Amino acid sequence: MAISRSQLVKELEPGLNALFGLEYSRYENQHAEIFTTETSDRAFEEEVMLSGFASAPTKQEGAGVVFDTAGETFTARYNHETIALAFAITEEAIEDNLYDRLAARYTRALARSMSNTKQVKAANVLNQAQFTAVTGGDGVPLISSAHPLATGGTFSNVLAVAADLNETSLEQSLIDIAGFVDERGLRIATQGRKMIIPKELQFTAERLMKTPQRTGTADNDINAIASMGMVPEGYSVNNFLTDTDSFFLMTDVPNGMKHFVRSPIKTAIEGDFDTGNVRFKARERYSFGFSDPRAIFGNGNLPTS
């Protein structure tokens, strides 16, 4: 349905001082703090996790060398979605000079709607990170204590006991990240690099990561997290996270959180011959997801459904 003069009656009145409601700022590109963006030229993308070799054994004198095999362990799939929205302005509204005054405002509102959808979809990868029905290529949720290994064992990217953000839980998260293993159970050098938090935890995070002394104590102990530079990229607030006491640590493991762009945002304007209306459209295709779950660590406070 097109925007008509009856919906904009005040705009036709003389002496109108201001229009409001479409000029709000927007939270934009917060997904870039979490996801690595890549381009795609097909309907979906797949990434295959490969297992390396086991720890090399000692070769006895005169004995033959041991041969090992490597292979594929699981495949992560990214299915692109098409996101689109449009609006129209009637020919009569254009004739009565509403086009010039409103088109730019509604175009900005359209951009804000498209941006909001993208940020919600990106954040939902984290909001649903412990949903039992939302699994990755390895068959378990993004945040899980039971990610399967090629050896038959498992590894965890979640605190053993769910905990709110504090000095103890953050330190334990960093310790657990440093203990990550690869698909064959070999230790890998991994560290936390950035914390992702909801807006409710920004003040707690600021105190934990930037004060020179430990928080909440009269002792003269240093803040070890800050002095050791344990989370070098600090923290980032994501305003689309829905759980107020969950936090995430992004690690330096590559090929983890991915954002594929199949078709970047495009806008179009066209006139309709029959009605004379002018129509505005925005459209883009993309996907959000994850390949290697070692790229992120959670505190375990998320809902499971």
Image (tube, helix red, strand yellow):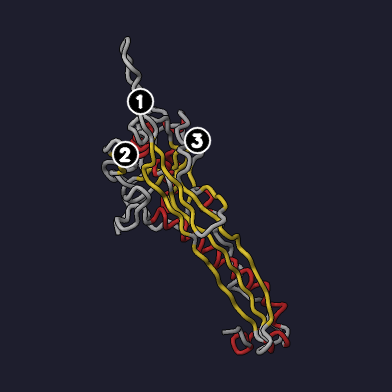
Q: Earlier in the sequence, mark 1 or mark 3?
A: 1
The residue labelled by disc 1 is 67
Q: Which one is closest to the eye, mark 1 or mark 2? A: 1
| SS type, badge 2 | loop
Q: Residue at x 36, y 32 (%)?
A: 69
The residue labelled by disc 2 is 149
| SS type, badge 3 | loop
Question: Can see residue 234?
Answer: yes
Whether pointer 1 and pointer 3 mark residues with C-beta atoms closer than 8 Å, the reply is no
Asked if 54 appears above or below 139 in the picture, the reply is above
State the image coordinates of residue 201 (x, y, percent, origin top left): 41, 49
- Which three-letter amino acid code belongs to the residue tagged 1? Phe
The residue labelled by disc 3 is 232
> For mark 2, does the 10 Å Cα neighbourhood hold few (<14), some (14 to 19), or many (20 or more) residues?
some
State the image coordinates of residue 221 (x, y, percent, origin top left): 39, 28
Q: Earlier in the sequence, mark 3 or mark 2?
A: 2
Residue at the top extreme of this rendering: 61
Whether pointer 3 and pointer 2 mark residues with C-beta atoms closer than 8 Å, the reply is no
- Which three-letter amino acid code belongs to the residue tagged 3? Pro
Q: Residue at x 32, y 56 (%)?
A: 131
Q: Which one is closest to the eye, mark 1 or mark 3? A: 1
Judged left or right of residue 182, residue 288 is right
**Quadrant, the C terminus:** bottom left
State the image coordinates of residue 293 (x, y, percent, origin top left): 39, 44
Judged left or right of residue 146, residue 28 is right
Asked if 218 appears above or below 289 in the picture, the reply is above
Please tell me which residue lies in front, 299 or 84. 84
Judged left or right of residue 197, residue 66 is left
**Quadrant, the N terminus:** bottom right
- Which three-letter amino acid code belongs to the residue tagged 2? Leu
